[in-house]
Structures are given as C-alpha cells and as structure tokens.
Image (spheres, rainbow, N blue to C red):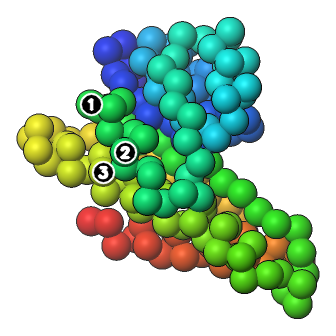
Amino acid sequence: MDWNGKRVLITGAGKGIGRATAVMLASRGATVVALTRDRRDLEVLAQEIVCEPICADLAEIGAIAAAVTPAFPVDMLVNCAGTTVLQSFVETEVVDFSHVLNVNTLAPVVLAQAVVRDWIERGIKGSIVNVSSDAARRGVANHTAYCASKRRSMRSRASWR
C-alpha cells in the first residue's frame, strides 16, 4: 500500500504496539497523528519521527472528540490505546473497572464515530483498525476488567457495518 499522502490517527502512540505502528507508518510515508496521554512519550516519539502530537487521556470520554477533531481530516484510525488493572475479580473496584472500560471499549467507539462522521461529511471512505487481544475470547487471571472490556469492544465492532 502507498502510504504517501495518507493521514493516520494512532491512539496509544506513545508506547508498545501504538508506538511501533506510528514509527512503521511514518517510515512508509504516512503523516502520523500521534495520540497518547503522556506528553513525555510524545516528545520522545517526535525525536524519532515527524508526527502531529495530541496529548489526551482517553479515559475522559467527554473530551475525546474535541481533542481529535483539530487533527481532521484523517484517512485511517488505528485504535491501539489500552489499559488494565492487575487485580483479582474480587478485588477489582468499580472505579478501576470503569476506567478500563472507558479506555478500551468506549474511547474506540467515540473516536470511530467522530472519524466516520467526518468521512460521511466529506463523502469519502476510510479505514479503522482496532487492536485487540486474545483476552477478548478467553479469561486471563487477574485481568477481569481487561477481558470484559476487550470482549465488549470486539462485539461492538462487529456491528459497525
């Protein structure tokens, strides 16, 4: 695929899979819009690649659309951001469960809605990639909230047609 001239919004671009995706796509000519919650991670990434940084916490659901809309238009959304709490089922607090659901399940929905609305308004098609985990299909000890969030996210995406 020719990435030259393509604008790609990547969440979780400061670490892990999101960072690796940002570096790889930038090396192939894409314009990377890098979103992460840690400003220092963005600064380190910007030393390695040319990118448009967005510092935003995806747990703050109400602020997501306002944070990403200035980056439009984009041709692709890559949802890589994710979080977990390492607690047993009995120890997982509701506030922790809610935080994991916001980042892993609700944020990708809100981001996709904002991006797709822009695509519809401009009369174009784009692509959305949602990075998930095998934890969406099977339970993992001490990852109750994570497994539930990834399963909900996977089932939600199946209806985005």
Name the foreground residue: 126 vs 41: 41
As drawn, the label of residue 73 is 1
Name the residue at 54% across, 76% down: 152
Q: Which residue is mark 2?
A: 66
Q: Amino acid at mark 3?
A: Ala
N-terminal of the pair, mark 1 or mark 2, is: 2
Name the residue at 89% across, 75% down: 87
Q: Amino acid at mark 1?
A: Pro
SS label for mark 2: helix
- Any part of residue 136 in sight: no
Quadrant location of residue 126? top left
Q: Position of residue 67 (x, y in %)?
A: 42, 41
N-terminal of the pair, mark 3 or mark 1, is: 1
Mark 1 surroundings within 10 Å by alpha-carbon count, few (fewer than 14), some (14 through 19), many (20 or more):
some
Mark 3 surroundings within 10 Å by alpha-carbon count, few (fewer than 14), some (14 through 19), many (20 or more):
some
Q: Which residue is mark 3?
A: 114
